[in-house]
Structure formats: C-alpha cells, structure tokens
Amino acid sequence: MTSVPTPIPSRTQYVREEIKRRILTGRFTPGQALVETDLAAQFGVSKTPVREALKTLAGTGLVVMSQYKGVTVRMVDADMAREVYDVRLLLEPEALKRAVRRGASLDAARDALTRADEAGDTAERSLANREFHRALYMPCGNPLLSRMLDEVRDQAALVSAVAWAADPSWEREASEHREILRLALDGDADGAARALHSHIASFVRRAFPEVEGDFEAAPEAQKEDGQA
C-alpha cells in the first residue's frame, strides 16, 4: 500500500501562521510595524509570500494596512474589545447550548482543557484555550454559526494576549472552563450557556474596566433572578 505524502505548507501559509503565532503570543506587540523586507529576511523568503500573508492577516483583523504607516499589528483598546466580545456573547453561548442539546461529543474540549493544564509555556496554553472554546461551538449543528465565530476567533485571541500580558489570570479562567465543561457534559445546556456567557463577559470587564456595564447578564440568568 502506497502512503500518501504529507502536503508541504506553502511559503505564504508558513509565513502567515508564524506571524500570527508571534502576534498572539505577544512577540509582535500591538502597534508594532511589520516591515516586509525585515520579515522576509527573518523567514528566509522573498517579499511576495510576506506581502500575501499580511494581506490575509489584515482580512482577519490581526494587522492594519495603511497607505502612510505601512502594516502594523492591530491596536487593542476598549472599543475593539467591546466589538469582538459583543459578537462572542451573542453567538458563542447559543452555539454551546445547541451542541449540548444535540448530544454532541465534547471530547475535543476535554482534551484541550487537559493540554491547557499541562502547558509548559504561555503560547501552548493560549493555543489550548482557543481550541477549548472552538471545541464547544463547532458541534452546534450550524456551519454558518461556527464560521461566524471562527471569523472573530483571532481578534478575540489578540485581546486575550494583551490582557494576559498585563494581568495573567490563567488559574481563574481554567476553573471557569472546567465548570462550563462540567455543566455541558451533564447535559445542562442552559446552565453551560449561562456559565460561558459569564466567563466571556467577566474576562473583558476585568481586562478593560472601561467597558463595565456594556455586558449584562445572560437573558436566562435575568429570568432566574426575577428580572424582566
């Protein structure tokens, strides 16, 4: 039986993933200029794959292309965090609720949580945490909903990277992740959705206090508290 060779990533794909990794782990910081010639030299490629990679990353919201300033890592502020996390709050708890009600497997989420706990560095832990959240919403049964959440995934990770650099809160978030997964595995769709909503909202409030009041309790939680 002839084995199928593993595809070799293109230069553009390699450069794109490496730049993204450096942004999301804080090696490239918000506002930092990304110069094509410098990056090409670092990665041992021509400027063409670097240019194409930067265009793709601009499309995902990780970098900003300006006629006057060139390409820079996107700045993170309260307005940016509010926009990205507002989308997550609207969509991610609902996606998890649907996944639980469908009885979808959450083994990937459990595995990601284990990898985060065992991570040896910030980059590995950050990647595992991103995979945990994605594993919660991917089996929701609506591919369009999953793609919409994927579109803001990198920007949410950039917000997280900036927040963790200023105030590491891994242990608290790990505890919240375990509770979300416990509720989901118990089949408590509404409870898991409420816990996820609270987790997302509390993180952005801690990281950016100026958005306080923008993220209210989930509708289900309001009903339970007797509020209209």
Image: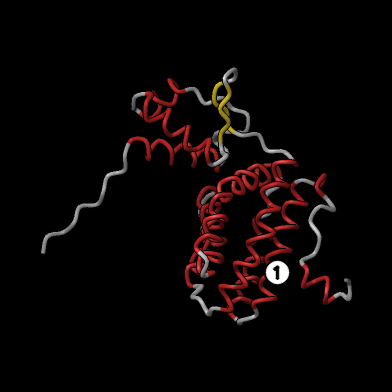
Q: Which residue is mark 1?
A: 195
Q: How many marks?
A: 1
Left or right of 182: which side holds 56? left
Q: Quadrant of residue 4?
A: bottom left
Q: What secondary structure is marked by label 1?
A: helix
Task: Determine whether 83 is above or below 172 in the image.
Answer: above
Q: Nearer the viewer, residue 102 or 157?
A: 102
Q: Which amino acid, mark 1?
A: Ala
Residue 18 at what x, y percent from top left? 44, 39
Left or right of 124: which side holds 87? right
Task: Determine whether 201 is above or below 42 in the image.
Answer: below
Residue 203 at what x, y percent from top left? 72, 54
Residue 200 at what x, y percent from top left? 69, 58
Q: Nearer the viewer, residue 123 or 226?
A: 226
| Callout 1 crowding tier (Cα within 10 Å): few <14, some 14–19, many ≥20 | many
Q: Nearer the viewer, residue 208 or 149?
A: 149
Q: Residue at x 79, y 56 (%)?
A: 215
Task: Determine whether 124 is above or below 172 in the image.
Answer: above
